[in-house]
Amino acid sequence: MAKVTFSVDLCKGCGLCVGACPKHLLVIARDKINQKGHSPAEITDQAACIGCAFCATMCPDCVITVEK
Amino acid sequence: MTVFEKPKSLTDAPLHYCPGCTHGIIHRLVAEAIDELGIEGKCIGVAPVGCAVMAYDYFACDMVEAAHGRAPAVATGLKRAMPENIIFTYQGDGDLASIGMAETVHAATRNENITVIFVNNAIYGMTGGQMAPTSLPGQVTQTSPYGRDVKTVGYPIRVCEMLAALDGPAYIERVAVNNVKHVKAAKKAIKRAFENQVQGKGFSLIEVVSSCPTNWGMTPEKALAWVEEKMIPYYPLGVYKDKDKEVEA
Protein backbone atom coordinates (compact mmCIF):
# COMPACT_ATOMS: atom_id res chain seq x y z
CA MET A 1 0.00 0.00 0.00
CA ALA A 2 1.25 3.46 -0.84
CA LYS A 3 2.08 5.82 1.97
CA VAL A 4 2.80 9.54 1.96
CA THR A 5 4.44 11.29 4.91
CA PHE A 6 4.75 15.04 5.39
CA SER A 7 7.57 16.93 7.09
CA VAL A 8 4.86 19.15 8.52
CA ASP A 9 7.09 21.95 9.78
CA LEU A 10 8.68 22.49 6.34
CA CYS A 11 5.28 22.94 4.65
CA LYS A 12 4.32 26.47 3.58
CA GLY A 13 0.76 25.54 2.70
CA CYS A 14 1.11 26.67 -0.93
CA GLY A 15 -1.29 23.98 -2.13
CA LEU A 16 0.60 22.90 -5.25
CA CYS A 17 0.40 19.26 -4.07
CA VAL A 18 -3.36 19.61 -3.59
CA GLY A 19 -3.80 20.54 -7.25
CA ALA A 20 -1.44 17.80 -8.44
CA CYS A 21 -3.11 14.80 -6.75
CA PRO A 22 -5.05 12.84 -9.39
CA LYS A 23 -7.21 11.27 -6.67
CA HIS A 24 -7.95 14.62 -4.93
CA LEU A 25 -6.83 13.21 -1.58
CA LEU A 26 -4.86 16.21 -0.30
CA VAL A 27 -6.16 19.26 1.55
CA ILE A 28 -4.70 22.25 3.34
CA ALA A 29 -5.58 21.74 7.02
CA ARG A 30 -6.98 25.20 7.80
CA ASP A 31 -7.58 24.24 11.44
CA LYS A 32 -3.90 23.43 12.03
CA ILE A 33 -0.80 25.55 12.18
CA ASN A 34 2.86 24.49 11.96
CA GLN A 35 6.11 25.85 13.37
CA LYS A 36 6.44 28.34 10.50
CA GLY A 37 2.89 29.59 11.06
CA HIS A 38 1.43 28.07 7.91
CA SER A 39 -1.52 25.70 7.60
CA PRO A 40 0.11 22.50 6.32
CA ALA A 41 -1.05 20.05 3.68
CA GLU A 42 -2.33 16.65 4.77
CA ILE A 43 -3.86 13.52 3.27
CA THR A 44 -7.52 12.74 3.85
CA ASP A 45 -7.56 9.05 2.89
CA GLN A 46 -4.22 7.26 3.12
CA ALA A 47 -5.71 3.96 1.90
CA ALA A 48 -6.82 5.49 -1.41
CA CYS A 49 -3.31 6.77 -2.28
CA ILE A 50 -1.87 5.18 -5.43
CA GLY A 51 1.72 6.27 -4.77
CA CYS A 52 2.14 8.22 -8.02
CA ALA A 53 4.28 10.85 -6.21
CA PHE A 54 2.74 13.69 -8.27
CA CYS A 55 2.31 15.64 -5.01
CA ALA A 56 5.99 15.26 -4.15
CA THR A 57 6.97 16.18 -7.74
CA MET A 58 5.18 19.53 -7.45
CA CYS A 59 6.19 20.27 -3.83
CA PRO A 60 8.78 23.09 -3.86
CA ASP A 61 9.99 22.32 -0.33
CA CYS A 62 10.59 18.53 -0.37
CA VAL A 63 7.95 18.15 2.34
CA ILE A 64 6.55 14.88 1.02
CA THR A 65 8.10 11.39 1.07
CA VAL A 66 6.26 8.68 -0.85
CA GLU A 67 6.60 4.95 -0.19
CA LYS A 68 4.94 2.09 -1.99
CA MET B 1 10.12 0.88 -1.20
CA THR B 2 10.64 4.61 -1.31
CA VAL B 3 9.15 6.13 -4.44
CA PHE B 4 10.14 9.70 -3.66
CA GLU B 5 12.41 11.32 -1.11
CA LYS B 6 14.53 14.43 -0.86
CA PRO B 7 17.72 14.16 -2.99
CA LYS B 8 21.01 13.86 -1.12
CA SER B 9 22.53 16.83 -2.94
CA LEU B 10 20.17 19.18 -1.10
CA THR B 11 21.01 20.12 2.48
CA ASP B 12 18.45 20.01 5.29
CA ALA B 13 18.26 23.82 5.43
CA PRO B 14 14.63 24.96 5.01
CA LEU B 15 14.24 27.01 1.81
CA HIS B 16 13.58 30.72 2.36
CA TYR B 17 11.48 31.06 -0.80
CA CYS B 18 7.87 32.27 -0.68
CA PRO B 19 5.10 29.65 -0.49
CA GLY B 20 4.57 28.07 -3.91
CA CYS B 21 7.76 29.48 -5.44
CA THR B 22 9.02 27.07 -8.08
CA HIS B 23 12.66 27.76 -7.21
CA GLY B 24 12.28 24.87 -4.76
CA ILE B 25 11.26 22.48 -7.54
CA ILE B 26 14.16 23.59 -9.75
CA HIS B 27 16.67 23.25 -6.87
CA ARG B 28 15.41 19.72 -6.37
CA LEU B 29 15.70 18.85 -10.08
CA VAL B 30 19.31 20.06 -10.15
CA ALA B 31 20.07 18.05 -7.00
CA GLU B 32 18.43 14.95 -8.46
CA ALA B 33 20.52 15.26 -11.63
CA ILE B 34 23.70 15.58 -9.51
CA ASP B 35 22.70 12.54 -7.43
CA GLU B 36 21.85 10.40 -10.45
CA LEU B 37 25.10 11.20 -12.26
CA GLY B 38 27.10 10.55 -9.06
CA ILE B 39 29.01 13.83 -9.42
CA GLU B 40 28.24 15.37 -6.01
CA GLY B 41 31.88 15.06 -4.93
CA LYS B 42 33.24 17.14 -7.79
CA CYS B 43 30.35 19.49 -8.44
CA ILE B 44 30.76 23.24 -7.83
CA GLY B 45 27.80 25.57 -8.14
CA VAL B 46 27.85 29.30 -8.74
CA ALA B 47 25.02 31.18 -7.01
CA PRO B 48 23.54 34.36 -8.51
CA VAL B 49 22.26 37.60 -7.07
CA GLY B 50 18.49 37.50 -6.82
CA CYS B 51 16.04 35.30 -4.96
CA ALA B 52 18.39 32.32 -5.32
CA VAL B 53 21.29 34.23 -3.76
CA MET B 54 21.30 31.84 -0.81
CA ALA B 55 21.45 28.74 -3.01
CA TYR B 56 24.86 28.08 -1.41
CA ASP B 57 23.03 27.05 1.76
CA TYR B 58 20.81 24.61 -0.07
CA PHE B 59 23.08 22.60 -2.37
CA ALA B 60 25.25 20.05 -0.62
CA CYS B 61 28.17 20.59 -3.04
CA ASP B 62 30.76 23.38 -2.98
CA MET B 63 29.29 26.74 -3.92
CA VAL B 64 30.66 30.12 -4.97
CA GLU B 65 28.74 33.40 -4.86
CA ALA B 66 29.25 35.55 -7.95
CA ALA B 67 28.72 39.29 -8.39
CA HIS B 68 25.40 40.19 -9.99
CA GLY B 69 25.18 38.55 -13.42
CA ARG B 70 28.79 37.40 -13.47
CA ALA B 71 28.13 33.74 -12.70
CA PRO B 72 29.11 32.49 -16.21
CA ALA B 73 32.40 34.42 -15.97
CA VAL B 74 33.15 32.96 -12.53
CA ALA B 75 32.16 29.51 -13.82
CA THR B 76 34.50 29.96 -16.79
CA GLY B 77 37.39 30.62 -14.40
CA LEU B 78 36.51 27.66 -12.21
CA LYS B 79 36.18 25.29 -15.15
CA ARG B 80 39.43 26.39 -16.77
CA ALA B 81 41.34 26.14 -13.48
CA MET B 82 39.76 22.83 -12.50
CA PRO B 83 38.65 21.06 -15.69
CA GLU B 84 37.94 17.81 -13.81
CA ASN B 85 35.19 19.46 -11.75
CA ILE B 86 31.59 19.89 -12.88
CA ILE B 87 30.58 23.55 -12.76
CA PHE B 88 27.03 24.84 -12.92
CA THR B 89 25.48 28.27 -12.51
CA TYR B 90 21.97 28.89 -11.22
CA GLN B 91 20.64 32.28 -12.33
CA GLY B 92 17.42 34.22 -12.54
CA ASP B 93 16.23 36.44 -15.37
CA GLY B 94 17.25 39.69 -13.70
CA ASP B 95 20.73 38.22 -13.22
CA LEU B 96 21.31 36.41 -16.51
CA ALA B 97 19.21 38.37 -19.01
CA SER B 98 19.84 41.88 -17.70
CA ILE B 99 23.10 42.80 -15.98
CA GLY B 100 24.73 39.48 -16.88
CA MET B 101 23.76 39.45 -20.56
CA ALA B 102 27.30 40.10 -21.80
CA GLU B 103 28.83 37.37 -19.64
CA THR B 104 26.16 34.90 -20.73
CA VAL B 105 26.45 35.57 -24.45
CA HIS B 106 30.24 35.49 -24.40
CA ALA B 107 30.43 32.30 -22.30
CA ALA B 108 28.02 30.74 -24.81
CA THR B 109 29.90 31.87 -27.89
CA ARG B 110 33.18 30.59 -26.40
CA ASN B 111 31.38 27.28 -25.80
CA GLU B 112 32.70 27.11 -22.25
CA ASN B 113 32.11 23.61 -20.91
CA ILE B 114 29.69 24.68 -18.16
CA THR B 115 26.02 24.10 -17.32
CA VAL B 116 23.73 27.11 -16.90
CA ILE B 117 20.33 26.82 -15.21
CA PHE B 118 18.33 29.92 -16.11
CA VAL B 119 15.15 30.54 -14.13
CA ASN B 120 12.76 32.85 -16.01
CA ASN B 121 9.84 34.15 -13.96
CA ALA B 122 9.36 37.40 -15.92
CA ILE B 123 10.00 39.70 -12.95
CA TYR B 124 12.63 40.86 -10.44
CA GLY B 125 11.54 38.79 -7.45
CA MET B 126 13.96 39.64 -4.65
CA THR B 127 13.78 43.42 -5.00
CA GLY B 128 10.00 43.45 -4.89
CA GLY B 129 8.62 42.86 -8.37
CA GLN B 130 10.13 45.35 -10.81
CA MET B 131 9.93 44.88 -14.59
CA ALA B 132 12.58 42.49 -15.91
CA PRO B 133 13.95 42.09 -19.47
CA THR B 134 11.69 39.04 -19.71
CA SER B 135 8.45 40.68 -18.45
CA LEU B 136 5.66 40.13 -20.97
CA PRO B 137 4.13 42.98 -23.03
CA GLY B 138 1.34 44.53 -20.96
CA GLN B 139 2.49 42.82 -17.75
CA VAL B 140 1.82 44.92 -14.65
CA THR B 141 4.83 45.20 -12.34
CA GLN B 142 6.00 47.71 -9.73
CA THR B 143 7.79 49.76 -12.39
CA SER B 144 5.20 49.26 -15.13
CA PRO B 145 1.94 49.93 -13.26
CA TYR B 146 0.04 50.43 -16.55
CA GLY B 147 1.53 47.28 -18.07
CA ARG B 148 4.81 46.91 -19.98
CA ASP B 149 4.68 49.40 -22.84
CA VAL B 150 6.82 47.98 -25.64
CA LYS B 151 7.00 51.40 -27.34
CA THR B 152 9.09 52.86 -24.55
CA VAL B 153 10.82 49.89 -22.92
CA GLY B 154 11.05 47.45 -25.80
CA TYR B 155 10.16 43.82 -26.09
CA PRO B 156 10.97 40.88 -23.81
CA ILE B 157 14.16 39.00 -24.61
CA ARG B 158 13.87 35.38 -25.63
CA VAL B 159 17.21 34.12 -24.36
CA CYS B 160 17.08 30.62 -25.87
CA GLU B 161 16.28 31.84 -29.37
CA MET B 162 18.98 34.48 -29.14
CA LEU B 163 21.73 32.11 -27.95
CA ALA B 164 20.69 29.41 -30.43
CA ALA B 165 21.68 31.79 -33.22
CA LEU B 166 25.31 31.54 -32.08
CA ASP B 167 27.61 28.83 -33.42
CA GLY B 168 29.18 28.27 -29.99
CA PRO B 169 26.76 26.64 -27.56
CA ALA B 170 26.28 22.87 -27.49
CA TYR B 171 22.81 22.57 -26.04
CA ILE B 172 19.96 25.06 -25.44
CA GLU B 173 16.53 23.99 -24.23
CA ARG B 174 13.53 25.71 -22.68
CA VAL B 175 11.37 23.82 -20.17
CA ALA B 176 8.69 24.73 -17.60
CA VAL B 177 7.72 23.52 -14.12
CA ASN B 178 4.01 24.37 -14.03
CA ASN B 179 2.70 20.78 -14.00
CA VAL B 180 3.93 17.24 -13.38
CA LYS B 181 4.51 16.51 -17.06
CA HIS B 182 6.61 19.62 -17.55
CA VAL B 183 8.56 18.99 -14.33
CA LYS B 184 9.50 15.51 -15.59
CA ALA B 185 10.61 16.95 -18.93
CA ALA B 186 12.57 19.65 -17.09
CA LYS B 187 14.36 17.02 -15.05
CA LYS B 188 15.41 15.18 -18.21
CA ALA B 189 16.70 18.41 -19.75
CA ILE B 190 18.68 19.43 -16.66
CA LYS B 191 20.24 15.97 -16.42
CA ARG B 192 21.17 16.17 -20.09
CA ALA B 193 22.84 19.54 -19.50
CA PHE B 194 25.03 18.02 -16.77
CA GLU B 195 25.78 14.94 -18.89
CA ASN B 196 26.93 17.19 -21.72
CA GLN B 197 29.49 18.74 -19.42
CA VAL B 198 30.68 15.35 -18.12
CA GLN B 199 31.18 14.31 -21.75
CA GLY B 200 32.98 17.55 -22.57
CA LYS B 201 30.44 18.74 -25.13
CA GLY B 202 30.43 22.37 -24.03
CA PHE B 203 28.01 25.11 -23.06
CA SER B 204 24.54 23.89 -22.07
CA LEU B 205 21.79 26.28 -21.00
CA ILE B 206 18.39 25.18 -19.70
CA GLU B 207 15.82 27.96 -19.39
CA VAL B 208 13.14 27.06 -16.86
CA VAL B 209 9.90 29.04 -17.20
CA SER B 210 8.74 29.44 -13.61
CA SER B 211 6.39 31.49 -11.48
CA CYS B 212 6.50 34.27 -8.88
CA PRO B 213 3.16 34.12 -7.03
CA THR B 214 4.10 36.88 -4.57
CA ASN B 215 5.08 39.55 -7.08
CA TRP B 216 2.58 38.52 -9.72
CA GLY B 217 -0.08 38.95 -6.99
CA MET B 218 -1.61 35.51 -7.47
CA THR B 219 -2.10 32.33 -5.49
CA PRO B 220 0.55 29.68 -6.27
CA GLU B 221 -1.94 27.62 -8.29
CA LYS B 222 -3.18 30.62 -10.29
CA ALA B 223 0.44 31.55 -10.98
CA LEU B 224 1.05 28.11 -12.53
CA ALA B 225 -2.07 28.57 -14.67
CA TRP B 226 -0.72 31.99 -15.76
CA VAL B 227 2.54 30.29 -16.81
CA GLU B 228 0.54 27.98 -19.06
CA GLU B 229 -1.72 30.72 -20.48
CA LYS B 230 0.67 33.65 -20.87
CA MET B 231 4.29 32.65 -20.41
CA ILE B 232 4.52 29.48 -22.51
CA PRO B 233 2.86 31.04 -25.61
CA TYR B 234 5.49 33.82 -25.52
CA TYR B 235 8.33 31.49 -24.50
CA PRO B 236 7.66 28.25 -26.42
CA LEU B 237 9.17 25.14 -24.86
CA GLY B 238 11.56 22.92 -26.76
CA VAL B 239 15.14 22.23 -27.79
CA TYR B 240 16.63 25.25 -29.56
CA LYS B 241 20.11 23.94 -30.21
CA ASP B 242 21.61 20.48 -30.04
CA LYS B 243 25.04 20.06 -31.58
CA ASP B 244 24.74 16.25 -31.44
CA LYS B 245 21.81 16.37 -33.86
CA GLU B 246 23.59 18.85 -36.13
CA VAL B 247 26.48 16.39 -36.56
CA GLU B 248 24.08 13.61 -37.51
CA ALA B 249 22.12 15.78 -39.94
Image (cartoon, coloured by chain):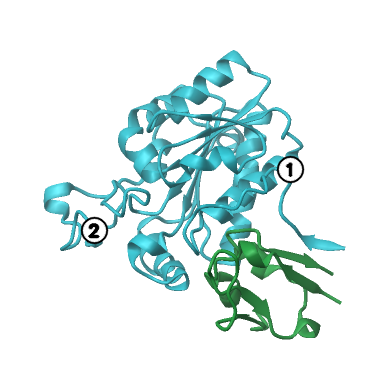
Chain colours: A green, B cyan
Secondary structure found at label 1: helix
How many neighbours does mark 1 have within 10 angstroms: few (below 14), some (14-19), or many (20 or more)? some
Residue under circle 2?
A: B137
**Which residue is more in the foreground, B243 or B2?**
B2
**Same chain for the residues under marks 1 and 2 in the image:** yes
Quadrant holding the N terminus of chain B:
bottom right
Residue at horizontal 74 percent and vertical 85 percent from the top: A45
Precedes in sequence: disc 1 or disc 2: 1
Q: Is residue A15 above or below residue B207?
A: below
Q: Quick check: B126 left or right of B138? A: right
Q: Chain of mark 2?
A: B
Where is residue B157? Give x, y as percent.
31, 45
Where is residue B119? Give x, y as percent.
46, 48
Q: Quick check: A17 left or right of B3? A: left
Tag 1–tag 2 contact (CB < 8 Å): no
**Which residue is more in the foreground, A42 or A21?**
A42
Q: Is residue B88 visible?
A: yes
Quadrant holding the C terminus of chain B:
top right
Where is residue B18? Give x, y as percent.
47, 59
Q: Amino acid at mark 1?
A: Asp
Where is residue B128? Give x, y as percent.
31, 53
Residue under circle 1?
A: B35
Residue at horizontal 84 percent and vertical 69 percent from the top: A68
Q: CA distance from mark 1 to mark 2?
A: 39 Å
**Which residue is more in the foreground, A63 or B71?**
A63
Residue at horizontal 15 percent and vertical 56 percent from the top: B149
Q: Is residue B188 above or below residue B164?
A: below
**Which residue is more in the foreground, B189 or B222?**
B222
Q: Amino acid at mark 2?
A: Pro
Q: Chain of mark 1?
A: B
Q: Quick check: A44 left or right of A31? A: right
Residue B104's mark? none
